[in-house]
Image: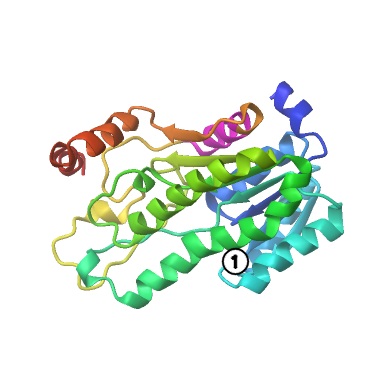
């Protein structure tokens, strides 16, 4: 991490969803590399507990309680970060959640809720942060998923929202290049967690129990979050456009474009 420490020393990194799960690990990895953090979470107790944990590790951190689905909160987290540090070098849009179920059994209200968090929250935070990232020639990191590139069974509205995040990231990348802002889309498979969250299903007869687990029943190994976080830092330093883990998933993505029927068959065999 020596090179990362040199690159990130005293840079300001804002991480939404930074008090739990993958967002917390990403924030910690930036902090361990010398960055000053602002972490955003919905629950005050989680945000404060994570901030205290980081401070124990000598990481400078600003805890912010906010709901990124509220446009006024998205603006406020950037304002508070600038008030504390005076600049912004990277925004990590890690706030989000997944879903389980059949599309035709998913209430429209659930579609809207997931859309507001995974898509509109990402867009609102990016719009609020963007002018300041132009000044620093900084980074936007959007956490997608393998589901951002290929839909799967049993994960309800989730791929719909993550495909939108992928499209937003590509279009932003094209528009941001003249401004010197780097955009990174991160598309990981299921991330290993000590206490994986389960997803109770309603009116979803026929969905296997494996679909409740991280990955939604996809037959792929779990990713170590610390390893993924280090890859994100390196991709930012090199200003790469995208991370896909496992890399072999790109083969499926290409097949989906060339021969959707074969792609669907592979997805069914893999879940």
Is residue 36 visible to the viewer in this orientation of the structure?
no
| Residue 147, position as x, y percentages in the image | 35, 47
- Left-right relation of 21 to 107: right
- The residue drawn where x is 85% and y is 52% is 85
Residue toward you, 175 or 7: 175
Q: To which quarter of the image does residue 25 belong?
A: top right
- Magenta span of residues: 224-235
Residue toward you, 174 or 205: 174
| Residue 148, position as x, y percentages in the image | 38, 47
- Left-right relation of 35 to 217: right
- The residue drawn where x is 61% and y is 68% is 42
- The residue drawn where x is 54% and y is 41% is 174
| Residue 222, position as x, y percentages in the image | 39, 38
Q: To which quarter of the image does residue 48 belong?
A: bottom right
Farthest residue, direction top: 2
Q: In this view, does 185 lie above or below 86?
A: above
Main secondary structure found in the magenta portion: helix
In the rendered image, residue 231 lying in the magenta stretch gets the answer yes
Is residue 42 visible to the viewer in this orientation of the structure?
yes
Q: Which residue was labeled with disc 1?
A: 68
Mark 1, residues whose alpha carbon is within 10 Å: few (<14), some, or many (≥20)?
many
Residue toward you, 258 or 142: 258
Q: The N terminus is located in which quarter?
A: top right
In the rendered image, residue 158 lying in the magenta stretch gets the answer no
SS label for mark 1? loop
Q: In this view, does 100 lie above or below 90?
A: below
Q: The C terminus is located in which quarter?
A: top left
């Amino acid at each position: 991490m020596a090179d990362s420490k040199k690159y990130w020393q005293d840079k300001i990194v804002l991480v939404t969803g930074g008090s739990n799960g993958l967002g917390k690990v990403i924030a910690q990895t930036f902090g361990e590399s010398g960055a000053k953090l602002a972490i955003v979470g919905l629950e005050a107790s989680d945000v404060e507990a994570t901030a205290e944990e980081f401070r124990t590790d000598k990481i400078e951190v600003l805890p912010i309680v906010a709901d990124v689905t509220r446009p006024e909160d998205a603006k406020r987290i950037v304002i508070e970060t600038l008030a504390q540090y005076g600049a912004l070098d990277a925004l990590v849009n890690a706030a989000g959640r997944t879903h389980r179920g059949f599309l035709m059994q998913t209430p429209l209200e659930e579609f809207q809720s997931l859309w507001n968090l995974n898509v509109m929250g990402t867009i609102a935070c990016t719009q609020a942060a963007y002018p300041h990232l132009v000044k620093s020639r900084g980074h936007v990191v959007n956490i997608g998923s393998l589901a951002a590139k290929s839909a799967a069974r049993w994960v309800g509205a989730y791929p719909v929202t993550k495909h939108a995040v992928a499209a937003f990231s590509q279009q932003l990348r094209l528009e941001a290049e003249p401004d010197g802002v780097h955009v990174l889309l991160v598309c990981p498979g299921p991330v290993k967690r000590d206490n994986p969250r389960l997803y109770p299903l309603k009116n979803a007869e026929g969905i296997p129990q494996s679909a409740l687990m991280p990955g939604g029943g996809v037959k792929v190994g779990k990713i170590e979050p610390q390893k993924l976080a280090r890859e994100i830092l390196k991709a930012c330093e090199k200003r790469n456009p995208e991370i896909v883990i496992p890399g072999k998933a790109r083969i499926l993505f290409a097949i989906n474009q060339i021969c959707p029927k074969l792609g669907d068959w592979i997805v069914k065999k893999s879940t």
